[in-house]
């Protein structure tokens, strides 16, 4: 036990000597004070069993400077109590959750303190006020607090090293309970946006808390460093398992509340938080839209994205108009019975992945992609016409895939110079007419890539 | 949300039904009328395929079943009896929309006050610009970006059916997403059916 505790104690000392930490720990006074009171109360009973050798050991270790020793006297005091204190923590957490005292242990906690815990958990403003008054307390207290939190923050180290002790085994059980329970209570309080939860049952929770609280920006860096140290210490003492458990717990409990993070310097009042949530939502939806709209990936500005979306919607609407026009032109009468039945037959086949068609479309698409960076669009069309000669199915498929892909490629290659909706429209037209041409008479245009578009435009004029 | 292919199938089914009804109603049509009928039925089919879950589909249906619309009877036929009671619900929505528009147009003081606010803002901006050069660029860039986004949002609202009544930007973007998916399905199906029809015609 001592061996495991010593690095922690050393670490606490270092941490206390760091001046930036004073301010950081102020907010946690109330919780830790109550904790400390209870620890002291319990101290008398457990102390007799364990305290002597521990005190000796640690005092021999730490007997350096006066201030530190002053801090340390209480720190060792607390450290001796780690086990008892930890059990007290267990009880505190459990009582917070269940609202009843747990009597599994021989030492019963102070009922007044027991009542104090849920209060702390529930009220949001009260602890802050209490902090404000208690900040003015002596420095030793603050140091003590950090010491307590550090020692209490690495509970796995205690029982893991102390397996010989029977009580320690009991503590292991309690600790496992408490890692879950403490997590729970922590989450609750966090959901209430209380910034002062320095119960510090686990390192993970502490880190999260640090990130969650923008107010404690000053002590952020030092504390994070210290928690990192703590983590490494914990790993050295091979007590990661319970931590992992608690991590899993936290992952399960995540969706209970909306996680809003405020970085340093960001406002934390409810209005700006809501605004931030709204903006995040919008950007998330925008990301979906980016996936949906071709050629929208590279645009980062919101206005540009909206532009792209507008263009796309407009082009799709025009396509609908145009297609209905063409359908009206093709069909002598309005009832499409034959054709549509045919289409209906055709349709599931297409959607289910009709093999030859799917294959050919893939082929053409890949060819398209290959030619895309270097070649002009028109030549690509020519290539497609050439490729389409193989089978009419391919041509059929081409019409589906081409017009969607062409405008985007067009967009990419010719940087918005000729890129107006009419332009894309024309390419579409050409493409469609290519296919129609091709289907009408199966004579291919093998050698003239430009023949297709030109003839298509002629056709368009006629129409 | 339905998957893309099921949406397409649903659309195709509705569309065929609508086209049959349209074709049986009138025998003689010129090209533009035919085109309008096809587009109308396609839009309605799209909207009913989306099952009036979204704002845009409701707006399309409401627009089609407006009393002054010439195709009202057609729309009611296409939508069928099961849609009719839904439409009854929708009439309340429509009424609310109409009330909102009426309110908006009648409340000219709102427009006026908006104009006043805008003008005063412009003045403030000008004053800011005059005051210091350093902040000017920031303010200018900020306001320009905001104006750009506002303009585009307005345009998007006009493009998406029923978008004028969406005040929230988040829901507007969601609507746009949904509408885009539906439009793509519509275009795909129409193109496919066109190629089939063209192939049949040419094959004959």
Image (tube, coloured by chain):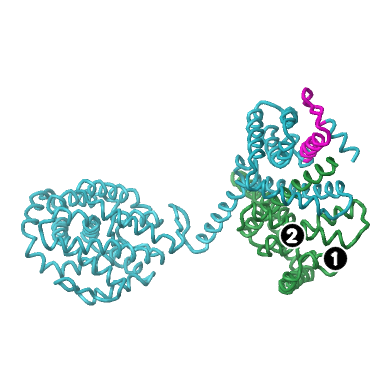
Chain colours: A cyan, B green
Q: Earlier in the sequence, mark 1 or mark 2?
A: 2
Name the chain under label 2. Answer: B
Relative depth, front residue between B183 and B96:
B183
Magenta stretch, residue numbers? A425-453
A452 relative position to A59: left or right? right
Q: Position of residue A131 (x, y in %)?
A: 32, 66
Considering the numbered disc 2 on the image, is that residue within a helix, a strand or a loop?
helix
Residue at position x 8%, y 60% from top? A51
Residue at position x 76%, y 35% from top? A418
Residue linked to disc 2? B14
Q: Position of residue B204 (x, y in %)?
A: 86, 42
Q: Position of residue B193 (x, y in %)?
A: 76, 48
Most extreme residue toward the front is B204
Residue at position x 13%, y 56% from top? A163
Considering the numbered disc 1 on the image, is that residue within a helix, a strand or a loop?
loop
Name the chain under label 1. Answer: B
A305 vs A193: above or below: above
Quote the CA–CA distance across marks 1 and 2. 20 Å
Q: Would you say the magenta stretch is mainly helix, strand or loop?
A: helix
Relative depth, front residue between A412 and B100:
A412
**Residue A457 seen from this side:** yes
Residue linked to disc 1? B69
A122 relative position to B102: left or right? left
Q: Quadrant of residue A183?
A: bottom left
Relative depth, front residue between A411 and B91:
B91
A429 drawn magenta: yes
Q: Give the quadrant of the N terminus of chain A.
A: bottom left
- The total of numbered circles placed on residues is 2
A148 drawn magenta: no
């Amino acid at each position: 036990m001592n061996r495991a505790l010593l690095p922690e104690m050393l670490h606490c000392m270092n941490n206390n000597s760091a001046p930036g930490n004073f301010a950081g720990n102020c907010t946690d006074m109330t919780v830790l004070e109550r904790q400390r009171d209870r620890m002291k109360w319990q101290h008398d009973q457990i102390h007799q069993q364990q305290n002597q050798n521990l005190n000796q050991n640690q005092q021999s270790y730490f007997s350096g400077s006066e201030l530190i020793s002053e801090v340390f006297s209480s720190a060792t005091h607390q450290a001796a109590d780690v086990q008892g204190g930890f059990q007290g923590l267990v009880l505190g957490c459990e009582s917070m959750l269940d609202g009843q005292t747990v009597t599994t242990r021989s030492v019963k906690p102070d009922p007044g303190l027991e009542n104090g815990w849920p209060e702390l958990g529930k009220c949001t403003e009260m602890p802050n006020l209490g902090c404000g008054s208690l900040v003015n307390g002596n420095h030793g207290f603050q140091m003590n607090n950090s010491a307590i939190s550090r020692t209490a923050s690495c509970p796995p180290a205690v029982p893991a090293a102390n397996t010989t002790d029977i009580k320690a085994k009991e503590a292991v059980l309690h600790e496992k309970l408490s890692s879950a329970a403490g997590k729970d209570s922590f989450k609750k309080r966090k959901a209430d946006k209380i910034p002062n939860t320095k119960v510090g049952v686990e390192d993970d929770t502490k880190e999260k808390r640090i990130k969650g609280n923008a107010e404690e920006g000053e002590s952020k860096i030092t504390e994070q460093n210290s928690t990192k140290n703590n983590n490494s210490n914990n790993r050295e003492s091979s007590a990661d398992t319970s931590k992992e458990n608690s991590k899993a717990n936290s992952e399960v409990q995540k969706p209970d509340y909306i996680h809003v993070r405020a970085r340093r310097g960001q406002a934390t009042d409810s209005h700006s938080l809501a605004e931030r949530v709204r903006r995040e939502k919008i950007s998330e939806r925008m990301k979906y839209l980016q996936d949906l709209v071709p050629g929208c990936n590279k645009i980062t500005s919101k206005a540009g994205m909206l532009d792209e979306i507008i263009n796309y919607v407009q082009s799709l609407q025009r396509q609908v108009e145009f297609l209905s026009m063409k359908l009206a032109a093709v069909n002598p009468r309005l009832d499409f019975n034959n054709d549509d039945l045919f289409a209906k037959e055709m349709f599931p086949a297409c959607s289910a992945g009709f093999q030859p068609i799917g294959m050919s479309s893939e082929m053409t698409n890949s060819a398209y992609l290959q030619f895309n960076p270097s070649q002009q669009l028109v030549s690509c069309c020519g290539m497609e016409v050439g490729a389409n000669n193989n089978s009419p199915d391919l041509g059929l498929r081409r019409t589906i895939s081409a017009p969607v892909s062409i405008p985007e490629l067009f967009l990419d290659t010719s940087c918005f110079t000729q890129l107006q909706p009419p332009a894309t429209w024309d390419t579409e037209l050409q493409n469609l007419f290519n296919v129609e041409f091709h289907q009408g008479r199966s004579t291919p245009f093998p050698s003239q890539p430009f023949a297709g578009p030109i003839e298509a435009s002629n056709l368009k004029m006629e129409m | 949300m339905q998957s893309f292919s099921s949406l397409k199938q649903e659309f195709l089914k509705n569309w065929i039904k609508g086209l049959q009804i349209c074709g049986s109603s009138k025998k003689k049509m010129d090209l533009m009328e035919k085109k309008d009928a096809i587009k109308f039925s396609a839009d309605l089919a799209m909207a009913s395929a989306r099952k009036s879950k979204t704002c845009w589909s409701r707006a399309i249906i409401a627009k089609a079943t407006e009393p002054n619309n010439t195709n009202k009877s057609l729309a009611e036929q296409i939508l069928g009896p099961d849609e009719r009671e839904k439409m009854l619900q929708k009439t309340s929505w429509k009424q609310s929309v109409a009330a909102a528009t009426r309110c908006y147009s009648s409340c000219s003081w709102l427009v006026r006050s908006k104009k006043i606010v805008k003008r005063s803002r412009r003045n403030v901006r000008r004053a800011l610009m005059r005051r210091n050069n350093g902040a000017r660029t920031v303010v200018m860039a900020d306001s320009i970006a905001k104006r750009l986004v506002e303009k585009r949002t307005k345009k998007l609202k006009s493009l998406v059916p029923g978008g004028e009544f969406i005040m929230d930007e988040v829901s507007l973007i969601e609507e746009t997403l949904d509408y885009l998916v539906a439009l793509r399905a519509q275009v795909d199906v129409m193109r496919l059916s066109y190629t089939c029809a063209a192939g049949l015609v040419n094959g004959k």
